[in-house]
Image (tube, helix red, strand yellow):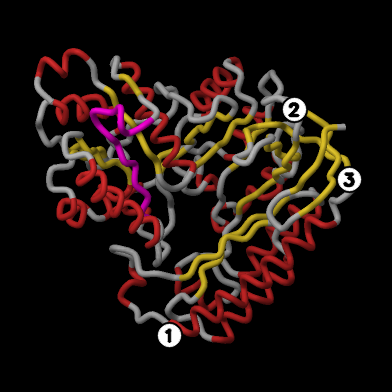
Amino acid sequence: MNSSQLDDSMKVFIETYGCTFNQADSEIMAGILNANDIELVDNQEEADAIIVNTCYVKLPTESKAINRIKNLQSEFPDKEIIVAGCMVEVDPKKLDDIGPNCSWIGPHQLNKTADVVKSALAGEVAREFGFSDEPKVCVPKIRQDPCIHVIQICEGCLGSCTYCCTRFARGHLNSYPIEDIVKEARQAIEEGCVEIELTAQDTSAFGKDTGERLADLIREVANLEGDFRVRVGMMHPKNIGNDLEDLIDAFKLEKVYKFIHLPIQSGSDAVLKHMRRNHTVEDYKKIVYRFKEEIPDITIATDIIIGYPTETEEDFMRTADLIEEIKFNLIHLSKYQHREGATSSSLDNIPFEDMKRRSKYLSEIKFRILEDENKYLKGKELNALVVEKGSKGGFIAKTDSYIPVVVQDVELRDFIKVHIDETTGTYLIGHKV
C-alpha cells in the first residue's frame, strides 16, 4: 500500500484462536485500532491488513495457526499479514520461517497495535515483542459479544508445569488492582453487558503478587448494581490453599455462576509430581468435595491430559477411577503432545496404540457420565440468562450452574425461568415458562 492509500483508509480484520484470554487480547487490539481511527471490518476480503491472533497451547491449534498464516500469504499477497498471540513469544524462529515478511505483535505489546499496523501498511516489517507489565484493564476494547464482557484480572502464572509452553509467552504473574477491575466491570454493566467473565491463565493466582485476593475481587464485582452474572475462569488447585472457604462463600453470592473450572490433569500422584503440578489427588478432592458440600448444584469442569510420557497403565486407571468417583459435569480431554520449549518434550512419547486406546476408554466414560449427570435435570424449572444466539437457530441461555440451554422465543439479556424438556451430554433443551 502506498502513502496516499494509507492516508485514505486503513481497514483491519482480526481473527482469533484459543482461549478466552486470547479473545480478550483481540478485543483490546480492536479497541486500540478503533481509538486510532483505523477501521475494523468483518471479513478478510475488505481488509488491507489481517491480524492472526495465535494460540500455541496444543499441537492442533499450532498447526491450524501455521496453516492459516501460510494460506493467507498465498491467498492475499497484496494484504499485510500481522501475527499476534503466543506464537510470537514461544516459537519466533518457526514464525520467521513461515512468514518472513509478516509483522508481529507480542501478547505484552498490544498497546503498540496501531503502530505496527501503520508501519506494515507503509511497507515496513514491524515486530513488537518482549515482556511488559502494561495493564490490560481500563484500556480501550471492542467486544466480540455485546452481552459478555471479558476482564483479564492478571496475566502470567506461578506454575512450572512441565508440559506447558504458554507460560513462556505470558511470563511472570502480573495481577491488576481490584479497584481497576471493578471500575471496568461497572462500566460494562452500565453499557448493557449481562455477563462478566473474570479470566486469567490461573485466576486462583490472582493477587499472590500484590496481596489482594480472588475471593475479595469476586465479592466486589458481584456486589455491583445491576442484573448480571459473574463467571470465574480456570483455577489451579495448588493456588487455592487457605482461601478455600472464602472462595466458596464468594461463589455462593447470587450473581456468581455456580461453576468452577479446576483442572486435575491426572488422577495419579506420581504423574502429577512428574508434571510439577504441586498438588496431590487428595488436595484436589478436598477442594471439590467442599465446593459440592456447600454448593450442591455447582458445575465442576476439569482438564485431563491422556498419555503423559511417564504415565503407566496403573496411573491411567487411577485417572479413570477419579473421573468415575467425582463425576465431573464437564471434562476436557487432551492427548499429550510435545510443546516447544516444554520440559517434558525431552521425554519419549508412550506408544501410539496405548494413547489411542486410553483416549477412547476415557471418552466413553466421559460421555456416559455427562449424559447421566444432565438426565436428572429433565422436567425441572431452572433460572437462566440468555447470552447468545444459537448457531442453528434459537438462543443459548446459561443456567445458574452455567449449563447451556437451547431455548426459543426469547431475547438476548433476558433473565428467564426455563423448563427442561430434553437433555444431552453437552447441553439442555427447554422452553420459557
Q: Secondary structure at mark 2?
A: loop
Residue at the image position 28 percent from the left and 28 percent from the top: 47
Which range is magenta? 43-56
**Residue 356, percent from left and from top:** 51, 78
Camera-nearest residue between 227 and 237: 227
Tell me the residue that label 3 is attached to: 380
Residue at the image position 67 percent from the left and 29 percent from the top: 222
Q: Earlier in the sequence, mark 1 or mark 3?
A: 1
**In the rendered image, the vertical position of residue 179 relative to residue 133, given as above or below:** above
Q: Earlier in the sequence, mark 3 or mark 2?
A: 3
Circle 3 crowding by C-alpha within 10 Å: few under 14, some 14–19, many from 20? few
**In the rendered image, the vertical position of residue 185 relative to residue 430, given as above or below:** above
Which of the two marks, 3 or 2, is nearer to us in this view? 2
Q: Earlier in the sequence, mark 2 or mark 1?
A: 1
- As measured in the structure, the alpha-carbon distance from the residue carrying label 3 to the one carrying label 2 is 19 Å
Indicate which disc residue 410 carries. Answer: 2
**Residue 334, percent from left and from top:** 50, 65
Do the residues bearing badges 1 and 3 touch, measured as CB atoms within 8 Å? no
Camera-nearest residue between 313 and 281: 313
**Residue that lies at the very extreme toward the right in this rendered image:** 379
